[in-house]
Every structure is written in structure tokens, then in C-alpha cells.
Image (cartoon, helix red, strand yellow):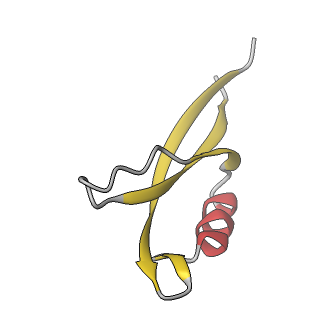
């Protein structure tokens, strides 16, 4: 049976005149993790709550665990 471990990386997003912009270059984040053996598993976007004034995408990476 294959075993995996997971890593969660938040990419903060801020409002701008052009809409919403990511504070970090998400493509660079994906390439950086791929070099370390991580594979992008999925991207999660939680519901934005104006009262929280926080908005982010969560990149979920996985890596196979070798025993």
C-alpha cells in the first residue's frame, strides 16, 4: 500500500484595482516544491469572509513516503 505525506502552502491574495492579485508567484511555488519531490495534489479556495479581510488559496502538495 502506498503512503503519502502532505504539505499545505497558503498563497495570500489581496484586492487591487484589477481584481484580486496573489502576493506570491504560485507558479514559482509549485516549481520550487517539485524540485524537492512534491507533487501538486490540489488547490483549495476557502470561502472569503469580508469581516476576516483575509483571502488565500491553499496549495496542497503530496509526496510518497518510501519505507
35 up-or-down from 60: above or below: below
* Residue 50 left/right relative to 5: left
- Given residues 5 and 22, the one toward you in this image is 22
- Residue 2, image x, y percentages: 74, 19
63 up-or-down from 43: above or below: above
**Residue shown at the point (42%, 51%) measured from the top left:** 48
* Residue 1 left/right relative to 65: right
**Residue shown at the point (63%, 28%) measured from the top left:** 4
26 up-or-down from 7: above or below: below
Quadrant in which the N terminus is drawn: top right
In the image as oriented, which residue stretches furthest toward the bottom? Answer: 17
**Residue shown at the point (51%, 43%) measured from the top left:** 7
* Residue 8 left/right relative to 60: left
In the image as oriented, which residue stretches furthest toward the left? Answer: 51
In the image as oriented, which residue stretches furthest toward the right? Answer: 1
Residue 6's quadrant in the figure? top right
- Residue 18, image x, y percentages: 56, 86
- Residue 62, image x, y percentages: 64, 39
**Residue shown at the point (32%, 59%) measured from the top left:** 54
Residue 31's quadrant in the figure? bottom right
- Residue 40, image x, y percentages: 69, 49
- Given residues 28 and 36, the one toward you in this image is 28
Quadrant in which the C terminus is drawn: top right
- Given residues 60 and 2, the one toward you in this image is 60
- Given residues 17 and 59, the one toward you in this image is 17
Number of callouts: 0
Amino acid at each position: 500500500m502506498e503512503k503519502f505525506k502532505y504539505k499545505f502552502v497558503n498563497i495570500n491574495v489581496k484586492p487591487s484595482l484589477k481584481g484580486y492579485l496573489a502576493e506570491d508567484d504560485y507558479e514559482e511555488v509549485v516549481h520550487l516544491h517539485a524540485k524537492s519531490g512534491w507533487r501538486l495534489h490540489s488547490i483549495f479556495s476557502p470561502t472569503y469572509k469580508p469581516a476576516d479581510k483575509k483571502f488565500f488559496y491553499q496549495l496542497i502538495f503530496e509526496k510518497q513516503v518510501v519505507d
